[in-house]
Amino acid sequence: MKNTLQQVFHSGKFVIGFSIFMFIVLTVIIFPLFVKTPPLGIISQGSIQGSFLPPGIYVNVYDSIGVAPYTLLLDDATAKRIASKLSPDDRTAIKEWLLADGIPEDQIDTTDTKSLMNLWTSNYDPNKELTGMTFAKMRFYQRLNTSLQGILSTQDLTIAETGTVTGTLQAKGSVSQTDYVNVSEVPNVRLLALGTDSFGRDVTPELVSATGTSLLIGLVAGLIATSIGLVLGLAGGYIGGIVDDVVMFFTNIFTVIPSFVLLILISFSIGQEKRGPVVIAIVIGFTSWYWTARAVRAQVISLRNRDHVNLSKLSGHPIALIIFADILPYIASYVFMALILQISTAILAEASLSILGLGPKTTTTATLGQMMNWGLIYMAPTMGKWWAYLPVIVIIALISFSLNLMNTGLDQVYNPALRE
Amino acid sequence: MSEVMLEVKDLTTKYITRYNEDIYAVDHVSLKVEEGKTLGIAGESGCGKSTLALSLMGYYFAPLHYTSGEIIINGRDISGMDPDVVRKSILGTEISYIPQAAMNALNPTRKIIDFIEDVYHAHDEYKSKAEIYDLACECCSILGLPKEVLQKYPVELSGGMKQRTVIAVSVILFPKILIADEPSSALDVTSQKMVIKMLKDLMKDGFIKSMIFITHELPLLYNVTDDIMVMYAGQIVEKGTAKEAVFDPLHPYSKGLMGSIIVPEHGLRDIKLTAIPGVPPNLKNPPPGCRFLPRCKYTRAECEANVNLRNLEDGRAYRCILSERELRDAYRMEAEQNARK
Amino acid sequence: MKGYTRYFGTKLAWFAVTFVVAFLLNFFLPRMMPGDPVAAIVARMAQGQSNASGVQAIYKQYTELFGTNKPMIEQFFIYVKNVFHGDFGFSFSQYPRTVSDVLKNSIWWTVCLQLPAIIVGFLIGNILGVLAAYLKGGYDKALMPISIFVSGLPAFGMAIILLVIFGVTFRLFPTSGGYGFDLIPNLSWGFVWSVIIHYQLPFWSIVLIAIGGWAIGMRSMSIYELNADYVKYSRFMGIKDWKIILYVFRNAMLPQITGLALAIGTMVGGALVAEIIFSYPGLGTTLLSAIKGQDYPMISAATLIITIMVLIANFALEILYGFIDPRIKAAQAD
């Protein structure tokens, strides 16, 4: 046993796969200990951009005004400020307008903000109708003009509050263009490493919790499937005869009828209410054992007539003892590999089910498949909101990949011919 | 003086392992096979007999690599030849090979006649299907195989039948030299007899001009071969005619080997069975001196230095620093000791 | 040929039994769901109607129509009778369309997409596997990790990746539908081209995943075969390398075909989800909307059709295997 473990951990592929997998598992376990936010808590209402918030550091504006500012004199501050308001597209649009107005092209330099703005402010007339300009375009230029007001000013902003007594605006303070606050002094800063999903939930804790649930489902389903497969495979392979015929009969039926179909049917008929993660795990486990059963049965049949088994039989050992002592050790490695495979398939099966909308209840738990489902329903891919679905896919792929890698590594340990 | 069919001079070939170690499985081997003669190569498992057989074909693929030496077939040195030329003009036509456990040597999903066609086509002989079939039938009738074999798949033939079929396929291009690697080891006694008879007939009728017969079954050697070569740990330790090698072995290893035969022949009944203790050396780091040293009863201090093959007259040779007389005396003394017990 | 009859006869009987079991499962499972779908339809139909007895009447009418007031067994036999006429009943969610009407189109789209995709993926994957085993070296070292990674990806994963890379970022291919929204099916070149363009992404998602999976398996099989005695012997009889690869390919493919039969169920499942990602008008999307609409006649029929397709595929493969494996041929010949 120790020798096997040594060999196993020598195999490069296995070690890499194992490390990746363990890393994910540990993250899932340790992360909630440090970050106490509830994974399904809704933290954002629809904002101007819609309900998907992009990843980033979110600083509370109200608080940052209240904090004592520091003065920093940076050379490129003004340029950056202007650049953020005036995108290259906008500059091209301004140039177009100016050209249409009759300004000669060599006087227009889109890279020189100051001169461009000068030209604009001196020439722009919101009411002027230039040839070939649609009404919508006119509106566009009006909006552009409004947003560009004061872009070159260096004045301070005034903060005013409505007086509770007088009901009028009273100046409270001012913000200068060189005022900076230290983020760590602002009381309310929130890091949304992966933004929010369509419901306004923080993706990062949601993802971790979903991974945990999916792994759990995978583990439970995998264990169930492997156990059923092992028992049936042993029974059919060793006992043979009628028992074997029955086992093969069921195995074949389950093999040919796509387990996907069975999953859909059963999940559907259980109904929305009863579909918790554990129930789903059980259902997946009970529909995917056929592969293990078939493989175990084949192995047992080939072992059945080996000399050491015959010897035990002749010595009068009870069947249970023979199975435990003579057969199981030989197929143990195989069964372990089958278990890994079943876990991997179970996780994918759950994901597929959830995408169809037949996964565990959506309100209490999140699973990886569910997150995919929500992303798809709310059109995240087409809208470019990559944080809602890409991390999920990466995690699913990593889990599958690491499990597969472990399996291939094990395969090479037990089948020397496959070693490089 | 009959023609020399195959002459090998100082052939060395090696295996390169996964960890880039060199294992010299064939170490400076020289031999000569004349027309009409059968050379037997004897030795225990792992001594290099099969590797030698593969090396003689002139076609190497990983992990076996050619290092040095000459292989002269019919006057042509094939040791440096381009593999493609070797494949087309040497393999199967000049020198052919019957593998060990030949029953597995046939592609299970190809009919025999189709495989024979492939062999012809590989040698650029684009005969028609009908022509090939006729040639194959002729071969079968010469070798005593029923024609029906041709249309069958290997799975439909018995072990002995498969072996004889493989022999037929190997000689179908009328090679001059046939290398038979343990042709009968995996068979039952009756099939063995048929296979040996087939091979002997091939020689007798002149379809092959000479044969190299590799085996670890010593009783066969005397019956089938004209000359015998004994190999140990990649080197030749004894060479001689069959009679000399079996009845008057010089090298202590050959002596021990022949001593393990039970042959109900006159004069040998009184000799006790002796086993040679120990195991052959690991060829990864062969010892500089005699490789048989740890297992030999007659060692001297000089044995640890390099021991060369001693060539006596008429092709007789042995690899030991002791002289003929010393060895024969030692053997006689031991035999008397054993008889007294 | 006589021996074949027994071989095929057993297989056929076997598939008949499996079909019956599948049929029973397909019928009973969805109907065990709690809740009354008829009520949902009635609610839709009777919107605006405040007359209670009027609603009742409508409810009665629909229950009669769908037969949900009869005991399950009776419903079953009616169903069987109808199915033999190709009548799967009315779709609950797309009433008044019948289920067969909706499915007729979907089946066609799915089969045209998945059948070629699975076959192409299988063939390319196996060829790459054999080459990896034979050529070894750099090619093998590059192929293995990629294959392991790709084969671990679920089909929808690959679908989304392709969707994002080629559909959204580079805008090379459309991201949904079977053909352009503005087109009506006809035989013009414009329509055909649109179909072909929409076909690409779903097709390649399925193919790429399949290649990954089969390449790995075939590589192991080929390595095993390449070490076999007959390869050495063939080489020593002078047979050229490419011919030997052909031998090995042929021999290693045989168990792969059995493997394909076993794996078709899963592959189809994965491909259906890929269809959904692309809103491809096949059985996948139909199934999805049926599930959303609690439309169990549709679900029953769709799953039954999927099962039948897989069964037929399995059967075809078993027949094929019987023909090309000479060992079976030989065993039957006496």
Image (tube, coloured by chain):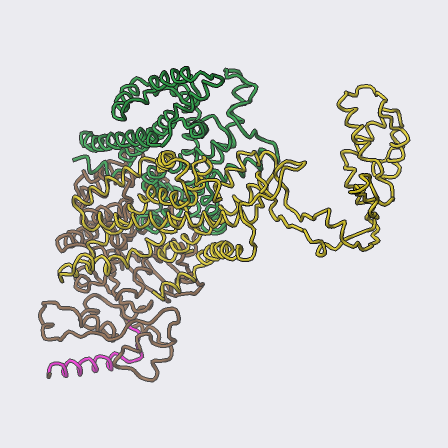
Chain colours: A yellow, B brown, C green
The answer to if B328 sits in the magenta stretch is yes
Foreground residue among B126 and C26: C26
Residue at 77% across / 20% down in the picture?
Answer: A134
Foreground residue among A382 and C264: A382
Q: Is residue C122 left or right of residue B137?
A: right
Residue at 30% across / 48% down in the picture?
Answer: C230
Q: Is residue C179 above or below residue A251?
A: above
Foreground residue among A299 and C52: C52
Q: Percent from the top left, x then y, of residue A150? A: 85, 38
Visible in this render: residue B60?
no
Visible in this render: residue A362?
yes
The answer to if A134 sits in the magenta stretch is no
User: Which image quarter is the C terminus of chain B in?
Assistant: bottom left
Foreground residue among B311 and A379: A379
Q: Percent from the top left, x then y, of residue C260? A: 35, 38
Q: Percent from the top left, x then y, of residue B204? A: 19, 52
In the displayed orientation, state which residue is furthest to the front: A165
Q: Is residue C243 above or below residue C306?
A: below
Q: Is residue A336 above or below residue B153?
A: below
User: Which quadrant of the structure image shows residue C270?
Assistant: top left
Q: Is residue B185 left or right of residue C233?
A: left
| Total numbered labels | 0
Residue at 83% across / 52% down in the picture?
Answer: A74
Q: Percent from the top left, x then y, of residue B324? A: 25, 78
User: Which quadrant of the structure image shows residue C38?
Assistant: top left
In magenta, the rendered stretch is: B317-339
Residue at 37% across / 27% down in the picture?
Answer: C36
User: Which image quarter is the N terminus of chain B in?
Assistant: bottom left
Helix, strand or loop: magenta stretch: helix
